């Protein structure tokens, strides 16, 4: 299901986080910003905007002509969970889907393969094959 995460690089993950945060801000802040903009465009003393922060709760209230037209509240726990939990879960899913790195042979307790040539390496000429030990005639 989430095998596409195995092909992601760190840049993809960070891009997904930023896209999530931009979308979250757009969805959660747009109604409040629009109410504030509408209230501030009314004639003087026709609207009031108030914001308060007490007991870890942020409250924003917009009143027009003495009536509350928009009220938004959020606790810091809610804000932290909305901002941090989905990216954290995506990060954990990404880590679990990544291919596992194979440990080095020394970590496995096996001797290194120093005596063997790498398959992709060109064969090296040894000193015994470049110089003849036979007497020259």
Image (cartoon, grey):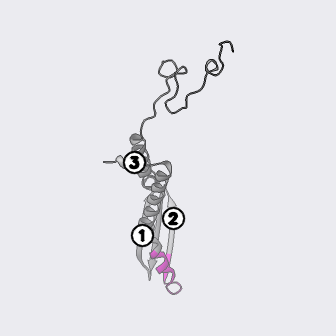
Instruction: Confirm whether the magenta stretch covers residue 44.
Output: yes
Q: What is the crowding at mark 3: few (fewer than 14 residues within 10 Å), some, or many (at least 20)?
A: some
Answer few, some or many: residues within 10 Å of disc 1's Cα (few below 14, many 20 plus, some between 14 and 19).
some
SS class, disc 2? strand
- Which numbered disc flags the more N-terminal residue, 1 or 3? 3
Separation of marks 3 and 2 at Cα, in angstroms: 41 Å
Give the distance between the C-alpha atoms of the residues marked 1 and 3, in whole angstroms. 39 Å
Extreme-left residue of the structure: 1
Residue at 47% x, 63% y: name it: 22
Mark with earlier residue (1, 2): 2
Q: Which mark is residue 71?
A: 1
Residue 44 to residue 82: above or below = below
- Which residue is nearer to you in this view: 59 or 6? 6
- Element class at badge 1: strand
Q: Which residue is mark 2?
A: 52
- Percent x, y for residue 79? 45, 56
- Span highlighted in magenta in the image: 34-48
Near mark 2 (Cα within 10 A), the count class, few <14, some 14-19 or many ≥20, is few
Residue 11's spot in the image, x, y percent?
50, 52
- Percent of width and height locating residue 113: 51, 21
Answer whether labels 1 and 2 touch (C-beta < 8 Å): no
């Amino acid at each position: 299901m989430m095998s596409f995460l195995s092909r992601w690089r760190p840049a993809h993950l960070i891009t997904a986080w930023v896209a999530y945060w931009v979308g979250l801000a757009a969805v959660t802040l747009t109604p409040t910003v629009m109410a504030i903009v509408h209230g501030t465009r009314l004639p003087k003393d026709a609207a009031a905007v108030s914001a308060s922060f007490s007991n870890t709760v942020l409250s924003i209230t917009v009143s027009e002509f003495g009536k509350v037209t928009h009220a938004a509240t959020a606790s810091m726990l809610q804000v932290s969970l909305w901002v941090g939990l989905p990216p954290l879960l995506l990060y954990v899913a990404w880590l679990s889907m990544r291919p596992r790195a194979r440990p080095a042979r020394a970590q496995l307790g096996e001797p290194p393969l120093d005596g063997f040539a790498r398959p992709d390496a060109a064969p090296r000429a040894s000193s015994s094959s470049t110089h003849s030990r036979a007497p020259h005639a």
